[in-house]
Each structure stands twice: as C-alpha cells, then as structure tokens.
Image (spheres, rainbow, N blue to C red):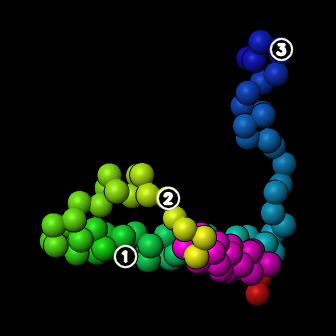
Amino acid sequence: MHPKGMDLQQINRPSGQHLKPNQVDDMGNALLSLTRHVCVLTDRLAVLERVLDDNGIEVSDLCDTYVPDDALKDRISALTSSIIEDVVSDLRGR
C-alpha cells in the first residue's frame, strides 16, 4: 500500500478494458510493425559496429559523446516520424 492509502497495483495496472475486441488485431499488427523496426535497427547497428571495429574504430565511446548537427537531427526526426506513423497506422487498422 502506498503511504497515502493508494494501492500501487491499481495505479500501475488500471483495471478495465483498454481495447475494443475489434482493436486487438490492430494492436498485434502495431506491435509486430514496431518489432520489425527494432530488429532492422538492431541488425544494422551490429553490422555497423563490426565494420567500424574491423577498421580500427571503436564506436561505443564515440557514440556516447557525439553531438549531431542540425542535418542529422532532421534526418533522425524524419526516421522517427516514419516509424511512429507506421505504428499508428497499424493501431488504426490501416
């Protein structure tokens, strides 16, 4: 029990139906779409790290301290928007 008398289980996992029966498939499609994006990104990152490492460039520390310029920020923003649009489209059943 929370000190103010609130049950944390109820706060973190509210009861009730969050999806209508006809939205369950849309949610599943959105989850699969998001998973595909994550897999592609994970694969590409692993390949990129290997290629750079094979060429004598250890990227882990460099990535942690890198500050992207405006052009890269714009590209990242566009890529993020594309992923979000795909997931939202699947949630809407499109």
Position of the C terminus by quadrant: bottom right
Name the spot of residue 92 as percent of width and height, x first.
80, 78
Local packing at callout 1 (Cα closer than 10 Å; few below 14, some 14-19, many 20+) is few
In the figure, is residue 3 to the left or right of 66? Answer: right
Q: Is residue 9 visible?
A: yes
Please name whichever residue, 63 or 50, is drawn nearer the observer in this view of the structure: 63
Q: Report helix, strand or loop for mark 3.
A: loop
Q: Is residue 29 visible?
A: no
Q: Is residue 24 above or below residue 63?
A: below
Q: Is residue 2 magenta?
A: no
Q: Residue at x 36, y 70 (%)?
A: 45
Magenta region: 72-92
Q: CA distance from mark 3 to mark 2?
A: 43 Å
Q: Report helix, strand or loop for mark 2.
A: loop
First in sequence: mark 1 or mark 2? 1
Name the spot of residue 3 as percent of width and height, x first.
77, 12
Q: Is residue 75 magenta?
A: yes
Which quadrant would residue 79 be assigned to in this image?
Answer: bottom right
Residue matched to label 2? 67
Q: CA distance from mark 1 to mark 3?
A: 47 Å
Please name whichever residue, 47 or 74, is drawn nearer the observer in this view of the structure: 74
Residue matched to label 3? 4
